[in-house]
Amino acid sequence: MGNIFDAIVDFLTEDDWDFSVQSDRLILQMRFQGDTEQWVCYAKAKEEDEQFLFFSVSPVNAPITKRLTVAELITRINYSLPIGNFEMDFDDGEIRYKTSIDVEGSRLDSALIAQIVHANVQVMNTYLRCIMAVIDDNISPLEALAAINETR
């Protein structure tokens, strides 16, 4: 495959992740169990661009009637995040959190991969409750964030 892909496979194996390769693409799929929810994660090697991307995909999509409210929520969350960002597909409501690194001219090692992966699932685990509250409980983004900040 490639150096980035191989480094990701080595890390996931060492870190005891159960993963599968998606066909012939340089994408690995796995599941992560958070405090209250489980979600799918993807690790993507972009060998030609010398980049590694890691995604946590929310287990629920934003319904069309909630997409603007969810967009406000993730914009407010993103403003305070030092690493990574939430994204939402306005067409189908998929919500995901992305962390990535460009390793052009250097080597991707397990320590860097660990930082990207662990930061990703930690942030998704923290803010998934906000996302679910806005979608399911009809509370505002500000109320959802205030509730999270009270528990932190």
Image (tube, rainbow, N blue to C red):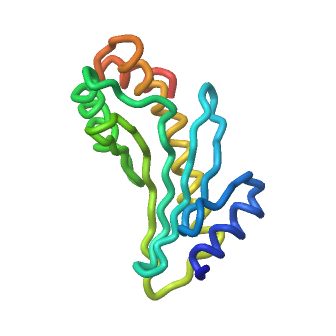
Q: Quadrant of residue 72?
A: top left
Q: Is residue 94 left or right of residue 5?
A: left
- The residue lying toward the viewer, choosing from 39 and 92, is 92
Q: Position of residue 46 (x, y in %)?
A: 46, 73
Q: Is residue 23 above or below residue 73?
A: below
- The residue lying toward the viewer, choosing from 104 and 61, is 61
Residue occupying the point 45% across, 33% down = 127
Q: Which quarter shows the N terminus?
A: bottom right
- The residue lying toward the viewer, choosing from 4 and 123, is 4
Q: Position of residue 42 (x, y in %)?
A: 54, 54
Considering every residue shown, the one lying at the far front of the view is 23
Q: Quadrant of residue 122?
A: top right
Q: How many marks?
A: 0
Residue occupying the point 60% across, 53% down = 29
Considering every residue shown, the one lying at the far bottom of the view is 105
Residue occupying the point 51% across, 64% down = 44
Q: Position of residue 20 (x, y in %)?
A: 68, 57
Q: Quadrant of residue 31?
A: top right
Q: Is residue 94 above or below residue 68?
A: below
Q: Is residue 5 left or right of residue 68?
A: right
Q: Position of residue 52 (x, y in %)?
A: 49, 68
Residue occupying the point 57% across, 76% down = 4
